[in-house]
Image: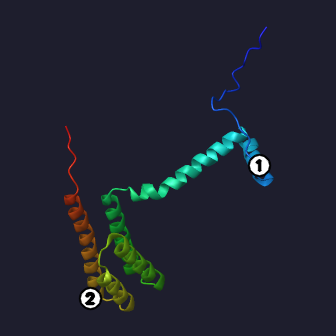
């Protein structure tokens, strides 16, 4: 009489192979497998899935729609300027300048007037420098918005049926 399988083993059509690795790595896989109550290969499988997803992240970031990038930088500029106005410390000024430079480098927007306004406000917190800072922030936000509008005009419209 033939033995009846209890369904515990899966047969993999691609077959099995041995993988040479350092004993220290095998011990890590073994420890994780015992902790989770799964087979060694499943630990390696999960690790590879995680690795593959981690490798995709930079392309996912690059594939974001322009409006997502624009609104992100608009938010960063506004929040950074707000932090500087609320608490004009050296750290907040440096963060503000760093954010402005990111917008300049990544979105190709002129921010010299914004940086200068932030520096002026840091030196002297009065109504004039505050208005200058607010106006500069609004100008950069409008330039970001205009960048989106201009680039949206260049993209072909989607045809919906």
State the quadrant of the C terminus.
top left
State the quadrant of the N terminus.
top right
Q: Residues within 10 Å of mark 1 (few under 14, many from 20)?
A: few
Residue visible at 42% across and 82% down in the picture: 93
Q: In the image, is residue 142 above or below residue 47?
A: below
Q: Can you tell which mark lies on residue 128?
A: 2
Residue visible at 47% across and 59% down in the picture: 58
Left/right placement of residue 72 relative to residue 28 reads left
Is residue 82 shown to the viewer in this render?
no
Residue visible at 29% across and 78% down in the picture: 110
Give x and y (percent) for residue 107. 33, 70
Front-lying residue, 103 or 3: 3
Give the residue furthest to the top.
1
The answer to which image quadrant residue 38 occupies is top right
Helix, strand or loop at label 2? It is helix
Q: Which residue is mark 1?
A: 26
């Amino acid at each position: 009489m033939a033995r009846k399988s209890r369904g515990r083993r899966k047969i993999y059509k691609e077959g099995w192979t041995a993988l040479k690795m350092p004993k220290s790595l095998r011990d890590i896989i073994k420890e994780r497998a015992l902790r989770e109550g799964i087979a060694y290969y499943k630990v390696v499988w999960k690790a590879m899935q995680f690795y593959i997803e981690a490798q995709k992240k930079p392309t996912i970031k690059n594939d974001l729609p322009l409006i997502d990038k624009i609104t992100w930088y608009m938010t960063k500029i506004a929040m950074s300027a707000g932090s500087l106005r609320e608490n004009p410390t050296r750290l907040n000024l440096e963060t503000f300048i760093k954010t402005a430079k990111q917008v300049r480098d990544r979105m190709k927007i002129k921010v010299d007037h914004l940086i200068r306004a932030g520096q002026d406000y840091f030196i002297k917190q009065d109504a004039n420098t505050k208005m200058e800072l607010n106006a500069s922030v609004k100008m950069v936000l409008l330039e970001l918005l205009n960048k989106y509008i201009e680039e949206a005009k260049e993209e072909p419209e989607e045809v919906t049926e």
